[in-house]
Amino acid sequence: MKLIVCILFVIGNISNNGKASLDSLVPMSTNILFEDTTKNADKSCYRPCKFNVKPRRCHYEFKIEPTILEDGRPALTVNGMTPGPPIHVCANDIVVVEVKNKVVGQDMAIHWHGVEQKGTPYMDGVPMVTQCPISYGSSYKYAFRASSPGTFFYHADSVHHQSDGVYGALIVNQPQPLEAHSSLYDFDRSQENTLIVAAKFPELMTANLEDSSQLKPSSLLVNGLEEDFKIFVLPSYAYRLRLINAIAIECPVVVTVDRHEMVVIATDGKPVKPVSTSRVQLYPGERMDVVVRASEKMGGNWMRVRGDGACGNLSASAMLLHQGFNYTAMLHDGKKETFAKDTDSGTQIYGQTLESIQDVPHNIVDRSLILSIDRHVLQFKDTDNDYRYISDAIPKKPFFPASLSLADKGVVQINHKSFLYPNVPLLMRPNDIKKEIKCSVGEKDQSKDPQCLLALNAQQGELLELVLLNEGFGSNDSYTFHMHGYSMQIVATMQGSDGKPFSKETFEQLDNDGKIKRNIQTPPLKDTVMVPNKGFTIVRIKLDRGGSWLLECRSCSLALPAALVVNVPESLPKSLLDSFPKCGDYRPPDVLLN
Ligand SMILES: *[C@@H]1O[C@H](CO)[C@@H](O)[C@H](O)[C@H]1NC(C)=O
Ligand SMILES: *[C@@H]1O[C@H](CO)[C@@H](O)[C@H](O)[C@H]1NC(C)=O
Ligand SMILES: *[C@@H]1O[C@H](CO)[C@@H](O)[C@H](O)[C@H]1NC(C)=O
């Protein structure tokens, strides 16, 4: 492993010589989003958001490369940092991020988690679905409008790259009077008061692709730190804090603040009816906004983050400190009060059981489909499975979005299918997808292969209901799913009470008997949901925008992906298509020299 890191560094350095050439890869100005923003660009777009002012163009450059961190640990960083530079903008600003991939032998793409990508489905950041992967030595310019306010984040599309450090906060602010719950807090300072939680691995996952399932996280981090992150407050004032679980594997986290209650006001960027609690739970990819009113008494308090699932036994902490308080003693005393003492009382709040603040319009569901999710042991050898997509990247090697060993633990599948990345980017070239790799949800299964491009072909405007059914014959795990481009209405979630596996037939029987209650009035709107073991979560999505949108279980396993793509027809103008980089059409200078 060490050797690989060294090589990454050597080649990474050489490639700096080719800087000028790397900069030349910029799509043509066929769309307003592609206008040159480097000149007169705003350095930082963090500012108080006002009414009736022109939105800004906020330009960022992300250089992704391997770095040895201060603690001696290797990581993939964005501009030398992990987490990467935070993005704080006002609603309707245009965010432009030029991503340069300096990681040898690795393809990259950045996903803007929770961003709706209205009008820009090709900026969603899924390689071979919405774009060509960014191969080593090349760059890609993302540009999208931050149309919805809220707490989001960005991360490398690959679980490995995200786990190795490529993630960061993305906060979209708006004028205070538009905030649904602004009366509940005095301060909303997203730059100081955002906590992004990650898991720290002892080694690079990217360097252990052959069997990264052996890698276990060794601790949790808040804003890249195990216990040093500090939030300064004034006595008796209320602060809006933004919590982000940016872990890519199945690690829910529970957050508490010693001696303080939290009022949950939003989940996944959308406001909810406020709920007061002492602890909140966030699944991987989920966000929650909470209000904490600082105590009157001068002092300092620990904020505790405890991991669950694959991060069981791990924790991290941050400090909530009154301005001017001497916290040296606090460090000496350590965190004597254990986590449990503070948190055993009170209910734990989950995002998907909250209620949206506004009633959802009552529409008739056009289609309801059941997705059977379970872990299956495949009767295949590793060599029978296709873990790669051929990106034509340089050097001419296939990229592996999943790790290379199934062992005999099985893989999580949807309708008995594992996701296969298409041969060309689906959104750009739907007609060039090989017929034999396609399989569809809700239509007769043409493909016998357990691995295929699983797609749900939808109509624009359709209200789709999906029952995410975690059957639990093959495992006792719960799974977290993320929907790209849309907020879903979470109308029901339930776990069977008898501890028995939950088949599709059982669900249909219960539903026909009217035993399944749906909250169609005030379902929370979320892009990330948990599907409980031997239970289900029912979501509804109003498909009002075209695009190829992934519905994925990122955290299901490191082996073959569990995902499907929701295809809403969208034809992109030829001039726009021509402006995108082609898969593998760029040769970094150092590679040519070798
Ligand atoms: C947590 O610690 C207990 C006791 O040491 C151990 O049995 C368990 O396997 C650990 N859990 C994880 C996820 O490592
Ligand atoms: C803070 O407290 C520590 C011990 O509790 C003390 O040694 C230190 O001098 C104090 N610092 C200040 C700036 O008062
Ligand atoms: C799930 O849990 C049950 C009861 O604890 C146990 O009997 C079963 O073996 C577990 N299944 C798996 C796949 O771990």
Image (cartoon, grey):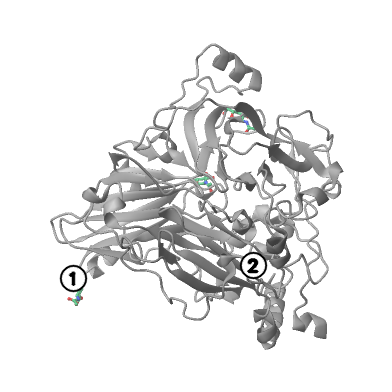
Q: Nearer the viewer, residue 418 or 186?
A: 186
Q: Nearer the viewer, residue 57 or 540?
A: 57
Can residue 476 be seen in this snapshot? yes
Q: Nearer the viewer, residue 179 or 344?
A: 179
Label 1 element class: loop
| Amino acid bearing label 1 | Gly
Figure check: 472 above or below 263: above
Which corner quadrant holds the N terminus?
bottom right
Residue 285 on image: x %, y %: 51, 50
Query: Is 321 on the left or on the right of 581, as rendered?
Result: left
Alpha-carbon distance for marks 1 and 2? Answer: 53 Å
Residue drawn at point x = 44 percent, y = 52 percent = 148
- The residue identified by callout 2 is 30
Q: Nearer the viewer, residue 446 or 106?
A: 446
Q: Residues within 10 Å of mark 1 (few under 14, many from 20)?
A: few
Residue 149 on image: x %, y %: 40, 54
| Amino acid bearing label 2 | Thr
- The residue identified by callout 1 is 324
